[in-house]
Image: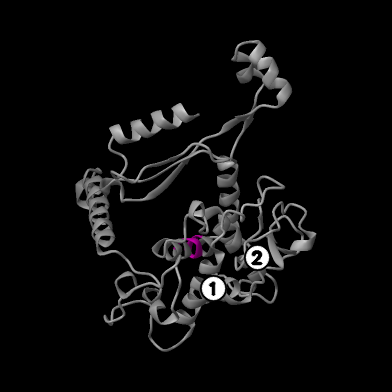
Amino acid sequence: MARLIKATSRALQDHHLVNPGSLVRIPRARVPLVKFQTGPGLGRQQCDLSFATLEVDDQVDSLAKASKGPMILRAGKLVSHGGQAAQEWAEDQKHEFGHCLQALVLVLKALLNQHGLSDPSQGGLGGYSLLNMVVAYLRQESHPEGALSNTHDPDLGALLVGFLHKYGLEFRYDEMAISLEENDFTGEVPQAEAWWIANRQQRRGAVPLHIHDPIQPGHDIGTPSWNMAAVRQLFASAHSALADSTPHTLQDGGVVAGNAAPTASTLPDMASSNCSELSRIIRIDPQWNRWRTRRHRSMNSRKRDRITSLPKAHSHQDFG
C-alpha cells in the first residue's frame, strides 16, 4: 500500500496536477489517503484521494505465508472505505432535499475551511460528517412543524441560521448522538442507547461528536473530530453574525479556530455596501473570483461558438 501511495503521489506531481508543497501522504490510517491541493489551472481545490485495503485474518495470513504470498490476494477480504456507497447515499439525499442540501453544505464547508476546521485529521469537521449533520437537520425541518413542511421554495437563509443555532447553541453534544438509521424523524439518539459508540471517554474540556455511519453500521464517523469545541463556537458566532440585525462580522463573535481568534485580515470586509448577508461570515478570495470570471467567460464563448456553428433556420422568403 505504501508503494502504491508513493507511486500515485509521484504521478500527480509529474503531471503537474497538484500545488507544489501541498501533497501529504497518510499511508497508515484506517483509510489510507493522499491529501493535496490542485494547481492554479484546476482552481486550487482541496482533494482527498483514498485507497481500499486488504483485511486478512490470522488463519488466512498463515495460509498466505505458507504459499509465499499469493494466497493473500485470493483469500484476503477487500475492505472498502465506502466511498462509492457514500457517494450514492449522498445522491439519494440530494434527490430528497434538492438544492437546500447542496447550498447548506457548500456554505458550511466554506465557513469551516476558512477557519481551519474542515480537516478531520486535524480534529476538524469533515465533509461526510457535516453532510450527515445537515441531513439530520433537514429531516427535522421536514416534519409537519418544520420549515420545509409547507413550502416548495424554502428560505435558504433561514435554514442556514437554523442549522447554526441547532449545532452552535442547542445540540447537546455530551448527551446525544446523530443516527440517520433511527426511525425517529429527529435523526438523534441518546448516547446511552447508541450501541455503536466505541470510545465514550473524552479528554477534559473536549466536546464529543458521535455520528452513526449510514453506510457502514457500527462505525462512528464523528470520533476524529476532537476539536468540536472550536466548531461549535464557530457555528454559534456565525449564528450571532447572521441573526443579529446589527452589521458586524465574525470578528465580533470572538471565534476560536484552533487556538487563536481570527484576525481582521482573515475575516470578511463589511465596508462595502455591495456585500451580501453571507459576507458577514464568509470571505471570498479575489483570486477565486477572477478565476470564476475567466471560467464563466470561457464557457460563454464556447456556447456562442456552438450556436454560430449550427445551420441557420430558413425564412419564409427562402421558399419563395
Q: Is residue 35 above or below residue 162?
A: above
Q: Specify whether 119 is left or right of 136.
A: left
Which residue carries the number 1 mark? 164
Locate residue 161, reporting x and y percent: 52, 76
Amino acid found under the numbered disc labelled 2? Arg
Q: Main secondary structure of the magenta part?
A: helix
Which numbered disc flags the more N-terminal residue, 1 or 2? 2
Q: Secondary structure at mark 1?
A: helix
Q: Secondary structure at mark 2?
A: helix
Q: Is residue 156 above or below residue 43?
A: below
Which residue carries the number 2 mark? 139
Q: Specify whether 226 is left or right of 298.
A: right
Locate residue 236, reporting x and y percent: 52, 76
Residue in the picture at 56% in, 50% down:
91
The image quarter containing residue 12 is top left
Q: Is residue 18 above or below residue 96?
A: above
Q: Is residue 103 magenta?
A: yes
Q: Specify whether 127 is left or right of 182.
A: left
Residue in the picture at 46% in, 80% down:
242
Q: How far is disc 1 from disc 2 in space, using C-alphas?
A: 15 Å
Q: Is residue 313 visible?
A: no
